[in-house]
Image (cartoon, rainbow, N blue to C red):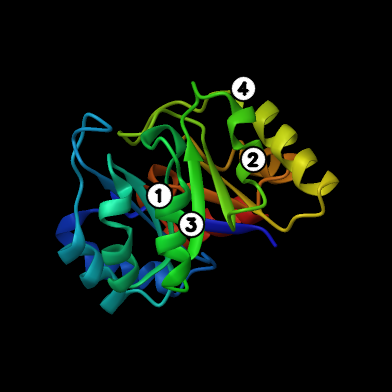
Amino acid sequence: MKQIAPSVLSADFGHLAEQVHIINESPATLLHVDVMDGVFVPNISFGFPVMESLRKHSTKPLDVHLMIVHPEKYVERFCDAGAWSVGFHLEAVDDPRPALELIRRKGVRTCLTINPDIDVHRLDPWLGEVDMVLLMSVFAGFGGQKFIESTYDKIRYVKQQIVQRGLDTLIEVDGGVNETNAATLFAEGADILVAGSAVFHAPDMSEAIRRMLQ
């Protein structure tokens, strides 16, 4: 099933509750929450209080993307704050097992993420260990970047591995997603598309999501 996960990082925080309610009524499946620490990426977003507030207002499951160092210190708190899934960057840890196990114990879906400059083959050992993989199609840390075309090759490779191994791991893509490339991304094997500016900066947010799904 094709899914769109609007990224709240691109929302108007002066009208956040109002915009979340629009997403609630839209065909979006998830609400994507980007958490940045100013260390792993050169930007800072928000933490637990905003996350808990989003949980109160959103009827869509919260898809949490941690762009932080030492994710193992925080994954349980994000699970407790209402996350449906918690993902972190493979390149941020020496061994993802401890953090993945903490997330699993909370009954929350697991996700591993890689930036565009990370070899996609590094995901191979983990495809059967996680519920989702998130392929960044821009560099993590800032919204509004241009889509990196080599992402298509990565999607095709990961999808091939999933099919050959009989896995049901989902592929999520984040960065530069819009109405122009959504259809191709789904066709190449993506299951979930994270869209920020293309949704929250659109005149009609629900209609923008519908067009990407079509």
How far apart marks 1 and 3 lie (CA) works out to 15 Å
Question: Label 3 sits on what residue type?
Answer: Ala
Residue 114 x/y as whole percent: 49, 34
Q: Earlier in the sequence, mark 4 or mark 3?
A: 3
Location of the C terminus (image quadrant): bottom right
Tell me the SS state at disc 1.
Answer: loop
Q: Is residue 8 left or right of residue 199?
A: left
Residue 202 badge: 1
Location of the N terminus (image quadrant): bottom right
Using a 10 Å C-alpha cutoff, classify the residue at mark 1 as few (fewer than 14 neighbours), some (14 to 19) or many (20 or more): few
How far apart marks 3 and 2 lie (CA) works out to 26 Å
Q: Earlier in the sequence, mark 3 or mark 2?
A: 3
Judging by the rendered image, the residue that carries numbered circle 2 is 125
Judging by the rendered image, the residue that carries numbered circle 3 is 5
How far apart marks 4 and 3 lie (CA) works out to 21 Å
Residue 61 x/y as whole percent: 44, 70
Q: Nearer the viewer, residue 74 or 140?
A: 74
Q: Using the rendered image of the protein, determine whether residue 11 is visible from the camera's viewpoint.
A: no
Q: Earlier in the sequence, mark 1 or mark 2?
A: 2
Using a 10 Å C-alpha cutoff, classify the residue at mark 3 as few (fewer than 14 neighbours), some (14 to 19) or many (20 or more): many
Residue 26 x/y as whole percent: 48, 69
**Image: 202 above or below 44:** below
Judging by the rendered image, the residue that carries numbered circle 4 is 150
Camera-side mark, 3 or 2: 2
Question: Label 4 sits on what residue type?
Answer: Ser
Camera-side mark, 1 or 3: 3
